[in-house]
Amino acid sequence: MAVVSLNPEPARPSIPELIARAKDMGILARKFAEKTERDRLVPHELIEAMRSAGLFRILQPKMYGGYE
């Protein structure tokens, strides 16, 4: 049985690019820290920024559209 990718393969960023994106998310997370603590919830804006940066794809299998 052949495995078929459910999502088109994303352009895979380099390791240094992913590290830079993660550092940027750290800066953004600090800006939302007070709101996160107050609401006991990670703000939607931060989750969307992480998704846009491709950070959720780091551990996602390639066959499901991740960077593996």
Image: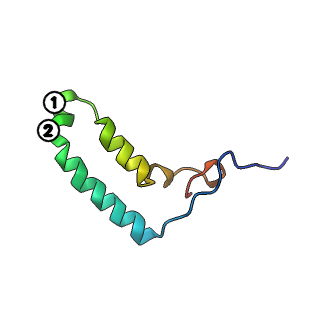
Taking the image as shown, residue 4 lies to the left or right of residue 1, namely left
In the rendered image, residue 23, in percent from the top left (x then y), is placed at 29, 61
Q: CA distance from mark 2 to mark 1?
A: 6 Å
Tell me what residue is drawn at x 68 percent, y 45 percent. 6
Q: Amino acid at mark 1?
A: Arg
Q: Is residue 15 above or below residue 37?
A: below
Residue at the (62%, 55%) spot, across then down:
62
Q: Is residue 12 above or below residue 29?
A: below
Numbered badge on residue 29: none
Q: Quadrant of the C terminus?
A: bottom right
Residue occupying the point 18% across, 42% down? 33
Label 2 crowd (10 A; few <14 / some 14-19 / many >=20): few
Asked whether disc 2 touches disc 1, contact meaning CB atoms under 8 Å apart, the reply is: yes
Residue 38, quarter of the rendered image: top left
The type of residue carrying mark 2 is Glu
Which residue sits furthest right? Answer: 1
Asked whether, in this view, residue 12 is left or right of residue 33, the answer is right
Q: Secondary structure at mark 2?
A: helix
Query: Horizontal and vertical percent for residue 27?
Result: 22, 55
| Left or right: where 57 falls relative to 39 | right
- Residue 41's place in the image compared with 15, above or below, is above
Q: Which residue is mark 1?
A: 38
Residue ID for mark 2:
34
Q: Residues within 10 Å of mark 1 (few under 14, many from 20)?
A: few
